[in-house]
Amino acid sequence: MKPSHIIAALLAVTVAAQPVLAATTLSKNERARVARAAPRDRAALTSCFIERKKAQKKGTVIGAAGAGAGTAIAGGDLGGSLLGAGIGALAGNQIGKEAGTSKRCHSLLERNR
């Protein structure tokens, strides 16, 4: 593996990790959904939305780093490594979004559509 591949992979991971460090806030639609929920469910629903968003961000970073590094190790060039990182980020984002919440959150989100 070339040193340029290692440097590019580290740079991609560093850039991709920046959103994880940012504060997690609710979108307009999520805030409206919390407002429509029963008063006893509002705090838990907010917590579930934040938990899901954090898992989604974490999945994005892990997917990008894993796929980019895997492509670089497999002998791909820089363009292939970046393409692999992009595809991995997209897949990780979706996997994190679905798998990042507990059964309690899934039922709470379904109940408060």
Image (spheres, rainbow, N blue to C red):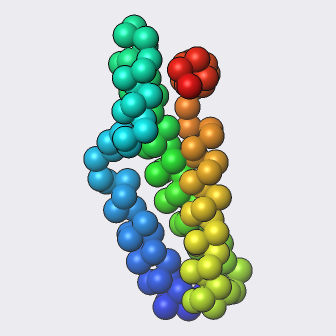
Residue farthest left in this picture: 23
Q: Work out whether 32 lies above or below 38.
A: below
Q: Report the label total.
A: 0
* Camera sees residue 105: yes
Q: Position of residue 48 (x, y in %)?
A: 46, 28
Of 16 and 90, nearer the camera is 90
Residue in the picture at 40% in, 25% down: 34
- Where is residue 41? Give x, y as percent: 43, 13
Instruction: Locate the C terminus and report the quarter of the image it occupies.
Output: top right
Q: Residue at x 29, y 53 (%)?
A: 22
Residue 108: % across, % down: 54, 19
The answer to whether residue 92 is left or right of residue 29 is: right
Q: Is residue 6 above or below residue 68?
A: below
The one of 89 and 28 positioned closer to us in this rendering: 28
Q: Residue furthest top?
A: 40
User: Percent x, y for residue 91?
Assistant: 65, 58
Horizontal side of residue 66 vs 11, given as left or right: right
Q: Residue at x 44, y 28 (%)?
A: 33
Farthest-out residue, right: 74
Quadrant location of the N terminus in the rendered image: bottom right
Q: Quadrant of residue 90?
A: bottom right
Q: Report the residue at 43% width, 11% height from top.
A: 38
Query: Residue 82 sits in which quadrant?
Result: bottom right
Viewer-side residue, 111 vs 73: 111
Specify the quadrant of the image occupied by residue 103. Answer: top right
Residue 44 appears in view: no
